Image: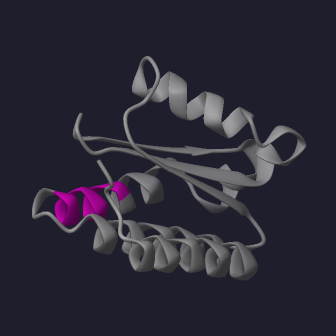
């Protein structure tokens, strides 16, 4: 089952690139079912950034399982504290709950990128 059209996927990719350019952080997004426990899988995806993990953000959206995880690296956490990520996640979840997957993704990526840029 395809969750995003080609145009929607392009919009999400562009949002990720803009967030990276503005903030200087690396952004990763996974939309789909996790392999194993959601948080553990998100942390594994984050660790896959290797040497760049300290300056990275991973957003995992489990549509079928109705779950969302945001994982940040050590350096990133100073610019994106847990409280900011929690508020962003709540707004994303609200969009998802009314069936707006793309809107929630675009909002979340943009908000995290803006917040990290403001605290640069």
Q: Quadrant of residue 32?
A: top left
Q: Quadrant of residue 5?
A: bottom left
| Residue 95 part of the magenta segment | yes
| Residue 100 part of the magenta segment | no
Instruction: Name the residue nearer the viewer: 54 or 100.
Output: 100
The mark total stands at 0
In the image, residue 115 lies at what x, y percent?
Answer: 55, 73
In the image, residue 84 lies at what x, y percent?
Answer: 45, 59
Instruction: Name the residue nearer the viewer: 14 or 67.
Output: 14
- x 18%, y 61%: residue: 94
In the image, residue 17 lies at what x, y percent?
Answer: 66, 76
Q: Is residue 28 left or right of residue 48?
A: left
Q: Where is 48 relative to 82, above or below?
A: above
Q: Quadrant of residue 37?
A: top left
Q: Where is 113 relative to 90, above or below?
A: below
Q: State the scheme by which the image is colored.
A: one colour
Residue at the right extreme?
A: 51
Q: Is residue 83 left or right of residue 104?
A: right
Q: Is residue 12 left or right of residue 47?
A: left
- x 53%, y 34%: residue: 42
Instruction: Name the residue nearer the viewer: 84 or 7.
Output: 7
Q: Main secondary structure of the magenta part?
A: helix
- x 71%, y 75%: residue: 23
Residue at the top extreme?
A: 36
In the image, residue 72 lies at what x, y percent?
Answer: 62, 46
Q: Read off the magenta span.
A: 89-96
From the image, which quarter does the C terminus lie in? Answer: bottom right
- x 44%, y 73%: residue: 6
């Amino acid at each position: 089952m395809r969750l995003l059209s080609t145009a929607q996927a392009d919009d999400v990719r562009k949002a990720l690139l803009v967030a990276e350019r503005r903030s200087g952080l690396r952004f990763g997004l996974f939309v789909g079912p996790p392999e194993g426990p959601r948080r553990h899988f998100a942390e594994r995806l984050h660790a896959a950034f290797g040497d760049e993990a300290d300056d990275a953000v991973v957003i995992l959206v489990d549509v079928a399982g109705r779950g969302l995880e945001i994982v940040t690296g050590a350096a990133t956490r100073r610019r994106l504290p847990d409280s900011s990520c929690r508020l962003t996640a709540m707004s994303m979840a609200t969009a998802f709950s009314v069936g707006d997957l793309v809107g929630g993704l675009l909002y979340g990526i943009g908000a995290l990128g803006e917040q990290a840029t403001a605290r640069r």
